Image (tube, coloured by chain):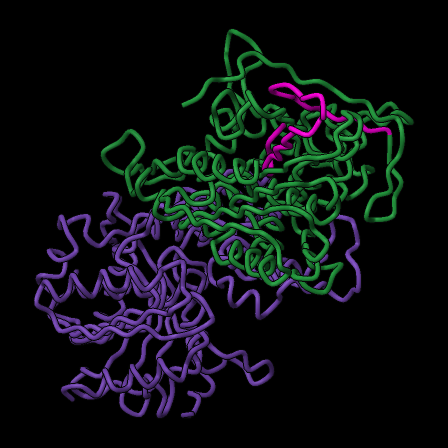
Chain colours: A purple, B green
Amino acid sequence: MGQSVGKVETKIYKYEGKIKLTSGVEFGPIDIAYETYGNLNEKKDNAILVLHALTGDAHAAGYHNEEDKKRGWWDEMIGSDKAFDTNKYYVISSNMFGGCSGTTGPSSINPNTQKPYGLSFPVITMEDAVNVQKILIDALGIKKIIVAGGSMGGMQALDWAVMYPEYVSKVIVIASTARLTAQGIAFNAVGRNAILSDINFNNGNYYDKVQPEHGLSVARMIGHITYLCEESMHKKFGRRLQNKEKPDFDFGIDFQVESYLKHQGLTFVERFDANSYLYITKAVDYFDLSSNYGSLEEAFKNTNSEFLIISFSTDWLFPTSQSKEITKALIKAGKDVSFCEIKSPCGHDAFLIEFETQTEIIKSFLKKDN
Amino acid sequence: MGQSVGKVETKIYKYEGKIKLTSGVEFGPIDIAYETYGNLNEKKDNAILVLHALTGDAHAAGYHNEEDKKRGWWDEMIGSDKAFDTNKYYVISSNMFGGCSGTTGPSSINPNTQKPYGLSFPVITMEDAVNVQKILIDALGIKKIIVAGGSMGGMQALDWAVMYPEYVSKVIVIASTARLTAQGIAFNAVGRNAILSDINFNNGNYYDKVQPEHGLSVARMIGHITYLCEESMHKKFGRRLQNKEKPDFDFGIDFQVESYLKHQGLTFVERFDANSYLYITKAVDYFDLSSNYGSLEEAFKNTNSEFLIISFSTDWLFPTSQSKEITKALIKAGKDVSFCEIKSPCGHDAFLIEFETQTEIIKSFLKKDN
């Protein structure tokens, strides 16, 4: 279905100014890592900004080198004739502010000290991340945009609609929520705790040593449990043992699900920075779209976008009820909204798996009024 | 409702023999810590064995000293005129084999080396734990017994019915399951991983030093998320900040739910041994009542008990569907079974909270045929 965007590269936009963060801190300069797919039209009104989830990066589609051809995280969704059709749209993806894949974050070199920021990096919010994306969009000369994201990316899409109503024509929010619940905060807090209490954390100054990989790995394992669901875990692993007939009666790996989680933890620490994990999960904890407006309905009052809200039936991290809450508030605020729950056995991760149904729904939403 | 059993003390039964464990290892001697409430009748047929959950102990009812009057974990359920009525029944509670509250476990002194077992303690199963309880029941001269337990205690109650059909007249299984699911194994595996990767773990030899309290604390925090539910967390904490108007924009504690979890982790390490946590969660992972029988129905075929199965509507760790699976298998096997789902907003923890409804149901079940 559709065609890949092929070989791409990550670019860096260097912003030399400063921005005021939610915390009150002024911060800059900021590098913004981004990729683009397709072509910006003359009127510069065919851009779609896709927004990555917790540990994603700017590499959303295509591949970087011919050898490994490692596809971007939404490769199935971005390309010629795909959900985000690069024949028609100019698709932009940038690494989140605070991240560790090119955009300035705690692992970046502080120009004043020539050392990594570490914990001297300011604590950020989702709104700060959106303001950094806005710098890039401004630099590209774009005044009208469609925003789309899954999970944490969906939070940013909502923020875009509320913060920049004149810019955003359409919003696609997938497997997301308008505020993190107590349970969500709890899972993040435990993950952070595992990192903060790792002997190698060293108050965030570990860049010339070993990073707190045990803690980061435990945090990732906890995350992965919430991205799947009992149904998908049962199908994928059940109670099957890992390459053995009988349990080992020791504390090594007995079950397939243990092996899977262990692997997820180990590979994650090779590609992700523990400090970035702290900063980004904290921004997720702080996310509450209604907080400055009194209610969700009030938050949506000044938006000028059409909304598409998608949830997945077995997602228990950001369940359908939370998508319905967004939808109801939009209806109350008199906005144009479509909502769809996709039946899927894949839990929260479905937005990275269920491409066919998502493509169909998104294509028809993007066609509307065009 | 009802009257407390008052001041009690934990006794130790010293078993000097050896038992053969599921793993094939022969192990002994074994101390068994236990408490009893009420009086054993002359026919010795009025005993109820109550079985504790993951981190419980023998102290199920009453208090140990006049000063703190710290009540046992099921104090509301055990006493004169309570669910387990000590006017009529002789209630026995023992600390699980592998635990750290009086019964022999990894923190106990190995008589051969005069040092704590640590990881030289054999890996155990739920069946091994039940066999150790059976030693105590034999020592008390009891041949007929009622067994009752919540969560992991419910697993042991099921094992009792299957392993000792001639002994068990009635079985009460609350908020439990016939096998740990992949998701359950996953949560346990992450908790163990946090302990095993703590720098202070030292291959389990930490008894003369600091125990791996960061890892154990993270494990406990993960556990607590699964004992509550989003509904109870929302009611209890919501997104409320901890003693502040605005977030701190640092990595300390911002939200009440973070403070709660942190507290649960910190107090847990004062009362529980990390090695015991490893051994007991492993026994829970291995638990699968059907594994030796091909099916749950087959497992129940030789039982001679009446069963009462209770679940709670918001328990997502061992949800109602898993209690229904037990009930269906019992019906298929032609056994006498009552099932009840209690509506409760308290999640898995409800078996330690919803006393009134449990008492009513259990009382009427115990009255049956008497």
Residue located farthest toward the right when viewing the structure as drawn: B112
State the residue in front, A315 or A292. Answer: A315
Report x, y in % for residue A356. Answer: 40, 84
Examine the structure image and report whether residue B44 is included in the region drawn in magenta.
Answer: yes
In the rendered image, the vertical position of residue B205 relative to residue A262, given as above or below: above
Is residue A56 rendered to the left or right of residue B98? left
Q: Please give the name of the residue rendered at 20% of the width and 72% of the height, measured from the top-left corner.
A: A307
In the rendered image, the vertical position of residue B347 relative to residue A160, given as above or below: above
Please say whether residue A112 is visible from this viewpoint.
no
Q: Quadrant of residue B145?
A: top right
Q: Please give the name of the residue rendered at 69% of the width and 33% of the height, measured from the top-left corner.
A: B96
Count numbered badges in the picture.
Answer: 0
Is residue B208 rendered to the left or right of residue A7? right
Is residue A328 rendered to the left or right of residue A28? left
Q: Quadrant of residue A262?
A: bottom right
Q: Please give the name of the residue rendered at 30% of the width and 65% of the height, measured from the top-left corner.
A: A154
**Range drawn in magenta:** B29-57
Report x, y in % for residue B207. Answer: 73, 26
Report x, y in % for residue A189. Answer: 44, 44
Report x, y in % for residue A141. Answer: 20, 75
